[in-house]
Image: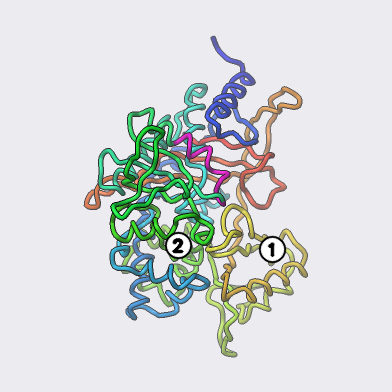
Amino acid sequence: MLLSIMDQCLQIKNRLIEDGVYIHWRISPEPFRINERELTFIESLGAYLHKFYKASNKLYYESVHGRQPSWVSEYLDQGKPQALIEYSRMNRMKGLLPAVIRPDIILTEDGMVATELDSVPGGIGITGSLARAYSFTSKSDIAGGRDGMTEGFLNMLKSAAHNSDPVIAIVVSQESKDYKPEMEWMAKVIRDAGFRAWCIRPEDVIFTEGGLFLNDGEDRQRIDILYRFFELFDLKNVSKVELIMYSAKKREVAVTPPFKPFLEEKLLYALFHHPGLKKYWLNELGEETFTLLANLFPATWILDPGEMPPYGVIPGLEVGGMPVTKWSDLKDTTQAEREFVIKPSGFSELAWGSRGVVAGHDISQKVWGDTIEKALMDFNKNPRILQEYHRGRHVEVSYMDESSHEMNKMPGRVRLCPYYFVEGPLDKEDVRLRGIMATICPLDKKLIHGMEDAVITVAGA
């Protein structure tokens, strides 16, 4: 029997509720459609971003050892506890990279812009559940397929553990508790497929000198791979984190993402665009990758209060056609000239989601000036970045209006969040697109993120 469009939406919603991942957003009857050219680009993008992480990782260590400018690692270490800095610099940690890569991509009239990268992203379970829910009702191809997210996540963990049948602990902190239901769903799906995975709290980890263990309800299982779903800025509030780090250091357990705060900094974009580092990036990435990322990453600057010489200018930053020589030049700008955002670079409770993000053209001149001042004052403990704002192109989606029991259309702007997983052994790594979450917000919203007024779905061709 063919379902009505309204019934399709209700079926999708009920499946999400059954999976325990539905919070509250508008339900579309179908995936968000992108064209074949866009999908092909997104499918290929993961390998380029993985290459960027490799080059960023190398840049940091070369800076530490004096082979690249010292200010690179100084910026990336700014505001971090010394113990974490030293831990991340250990030789045995050197080659470890994020195995999940999720850019935030805005579709603009001129193409795609990746406003930031996230290596500890939420939404993995939600996107997996959405893909399954839409696979029952939609005739559209879903990027990554019905089970792409769960298969990719599992394969990534197998690769990180160097084990084809690892015991998996997805450890979710109190600070990240809002994401626990989706990771519990992910663990259950993996168990249903015949593998061993549990979503637990840090305090549930059992430490011994011989490794880390968990109770699965019947037996004690030794953990082979621990998926870190907690933020590095919150380590002081994460129970048993010292024991987890000790076990990882002793190679009693594999942990991903690695304890490398410098790879979770948004200011990496500013380093990528810095003219003094262009030769490094070209050498490491090659011209093709460098050009692609230069067009994809918005221009970004670190809000550093350091003194500039009288003849100095901030590279690439202009207002009203004039080069900016000091940050105070930005304060007296018109609304049209303030098409920038300011956001924490990382290592802060304000650095994820849309928390702490300020859009210059959405506030008064005074508030904008105060925001710049605060960013400069907080530089030593919480660096912020200035980034060009790119307006998303207009799209239109259908959604179920539960108050009127009708289908409505909503004009909006979309953010695509592709999920890439690094799968396979080191000598044959494959960075695969396994799913795309699409978030469409109404046109009056300057920042696109999950909200009650948003339509959240998966993307497909």
Q: Residue furthest left?
A: 427
Residue at the disc numbered 2 = 294
Left or right, 349 with reference to 198: right
Disc ID at residue 284: none
For badge 2, the amino acid type reads Ala
| Residue 339 location, quadrant | bottom right
Determine whether label 1 and label 2 are within 8 Å by CB. no
**Residue 446 against residue 20 in the figure, above or below:** below
The image position of residue 241, as x and y in percent, is 44, 57
For badge 1, the amino acid type reads Gly
The image position of residue 165, as x and y in percent, is 27, 38
Which callout, 1 or 2, points at the residue further toward the start of the chain? 2
Q: How many discs appear?
A: 2
Region of the chain picked out in magenta, as a range: 175-186
Q: CA distance from mark 1 to mark 2?
A: 23 Å
Is 180 within the magenta? Answer: yes
Left or right, 396 with reference to 244: right
Residue located at (57% from left, 25% from top)? 12
Q: Nearer the viewer, residue 27 or 185?
A: 185
Mark 1 surroundings: few (<14), some (14-19) or many (≥20) residues within 10 A: many
**Residue 52 against residue 16 in the figure, above or below:** below
Q: For numbered disc 2, what is the local secondary structure?
A: helix
Residue located at (52% from left, 62% from top)? 236
Residue 286 visible somewhere in the drawing: no
The image position of residue 335, as x and y in percent, is 74, 64
Residue 273 visible somewhere in the drawing: yes
| Residue 88 location, quadrant | bottom left
Is 33 within the magenta? Answer: no
Residue at the disc numbered 1 = 360
Say which of marks 1 and 2 sits in front: 1
Q: Residue furthest top?
A: 1
